[in-house]
Amino acid sequence: MRDLSKFYIDGQWVDPIGTGRAEVINPATEAVSGSIALGSEADVDRAVAAARRAFATWGESSREERLELLLSVQAEYARRSEELADAVTEEMGAPRAFAGQLHVGLGSWHLQAAIELLRGFAFEEQRGATLLRREPIGVCGLITPWNWPINQVAVKVFPVLATGCTAILKPAQLSPYSAQILAEILDAAGTPAGVFNLVQGKGSVIGTALSRHADVDMISFTGSEEVGVQIQRDAAETVKRVGLELGGKSAWVILDDASLSRNVGEATATMMSNSGQTCSAGSRLLVPAARLEEALAASRGAAEAVVTGNPAGNVAMGPVVSKAQFNVIQSYIEKGVAEGATLVAGGPGRPEDLEAGYFVRPTVFLGTNDMAIAREEIFGPVQTIIPYTDIDDAVAIANDSNFGLSGYVSGEDAEVAAGIARRLRTGSVRINGGFDIAAPFGGYKRSGNGREWGEYGFLEYLEIKAVIGAPSAA
Ligand code: TAP
């Protein structure tokens, strides 16, 4: 049983001022796995004051000091990586091997990327008569979700440290354990007091207090559209910068020259990983109409091959994060049936062999782009196959969405794939499984604003100052 009863503020583990507690449920067993203290507005005030004090010196720190800290964090992170993976499995149900390889792996890759970038990053640059300075924005409120609990914290905290900002992290109540270990890692690595602070608690209390706080310069948020809109409202009065990474309904376009068994199979299997709880998931699978039957068979085969069960074991898919999330996903599956979509694989209810836990059957529909299952983010292992007639049709369907986070194209002809990628109104497009830890990540339209990861992730936390007429350094 884990008991998280302290917050990390000003370099100390302190007793909360808020008196509430919340239980944490293991989604694979539905049993209580521990509990956390819930903070209050007064806890936020204390953490913001610490971050503000620390910014006075950390904001002036040298590249070398920040590099030294990140390298020290890297050593501690490696030392605690098994515990981090255990925590992720316990709090949000990711299969243990997957949690180690990808959840913990992504955190370490982002850390390595931040270290490499910081070594050569141009914080100052002469442009004609102007000296362009990139200066840390200040005190940042970081509000994160539970779906990739380490990744979402890593893409905010490591750039914050690298750019000389200070932060207060408010992780999701559903995934408090990995955030606690990350705070312990930062503490053990020698992070100066107040540079990083952790306050656990309810989004409606801690998140709201951070968003409205006059002494917070920026909020970086990842999560639902609804909360993103609320944060912008709350932040408006203090004119702070708000970075939003919201949802998606990304299209995965399979070209007509593709091997359907391989590419459709991969698209469906990828959709089911992390129980479909990935903002950039390819939840709309666009296949050539002329090869529909072949595509349906390939997708069905891949969905039925997904071994679902106890995440401690050798499975491809664990439960979804919570009972509320389970119910939302079930209602979408029922809605899909009611809307007239054809079930290709899976369907309502829990897999037959599982008696407890928030397990969902890997589900694939054949549907149309106007159905709710094709328009709204389900955030579960549910994919909708939509046939297209030609490339223009595929691009039109892919772009017919309120979201614009990611896109995928699979096929033999790289030129055709790149041509489609150029036409998609999304923040990124992955061709044939391409992946780059340094590529910017973020969305068009209602998928948010700003970009995380790599160089663009640093720029989120930097102000630009023009010093005109200064003597050139060169
Ligand atoms: P959200 O409610 O958006 O939660 C994300 C974070 O925001 C959590 O830390 C949450 O705290 C906090 N929060 C909640 N209300 C807030 C407020 N008024 N002001 C500031 N912060 C606030 O996500 P959810 O409820 O966990 O999931 C709901 C849906 O959001 C999902 O079904 C999915 O569609 C979408 N979602 C998207 C993403 C990504 S990566 N795009 C990630 C997660 C969820 P609490 O812990 O108290 O809730």
Image (cartoon, helix red, strand yellow):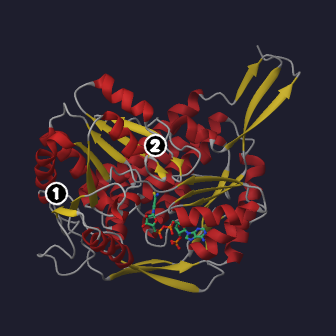
**Circle 1 residue:** 303
56 above or below 409?
below
User: Which numbered disc covers residue 75?
Assistant: none
| Residue 236 rendering spot, x and y as whole percentages | 74, 61
The image quarter in which residue 263 lies: top left
Q: Earlier in the sequence, mark 1 or mark 2?
A: 2
403 above or below 395?
below
Q: Residue at x 28, y 75 (%)?
A: 358
Q: Are marks 1 and 2 in contact (CB under 8 Å)?
A: no
Count neighbours of disc 2 (C-alpha within 10 A) and say few if under 14, some if 14 to 19, many if 20 or more. Answer: many
Disc 1, ligand 1: is the CB inside 8 Å? no
419 above or below 288?
above
User: Which numbered disc covers residue 110?
Assistant: 2
| Residue 144 rendering spot, x and y as whole percentages | 52, 61
The image quarter in which residue 422 lies: top left
Q: Nearer the viewer, residue 329 or 289?
A: 289
Q: Residue furthest right?
A: 469
- Describe the element under mark 2 as helix, strand or loop: helix
- Describe the element under mark 1 as helix, strand or loop: helix
Question: Looking at the figure, which quarter contains the N terminus?
Answer: bottom left
Q: Nearer the viewer, residue 462 or 250?
A: 250
Q: Nearer the viewer, mark 1 or mark 2?
A: 1
Q: Amino acid at mark 2?
A: His
Q: Amino acid at mark 1?
A: Ala
| Residue 453 rendering spot, x and y as whole percentages | 50, 41
Determine the CA span between mark 1 and mark 2.
30 Å
Q: Nearer the viewer, residue 423 or 202?
A: 423
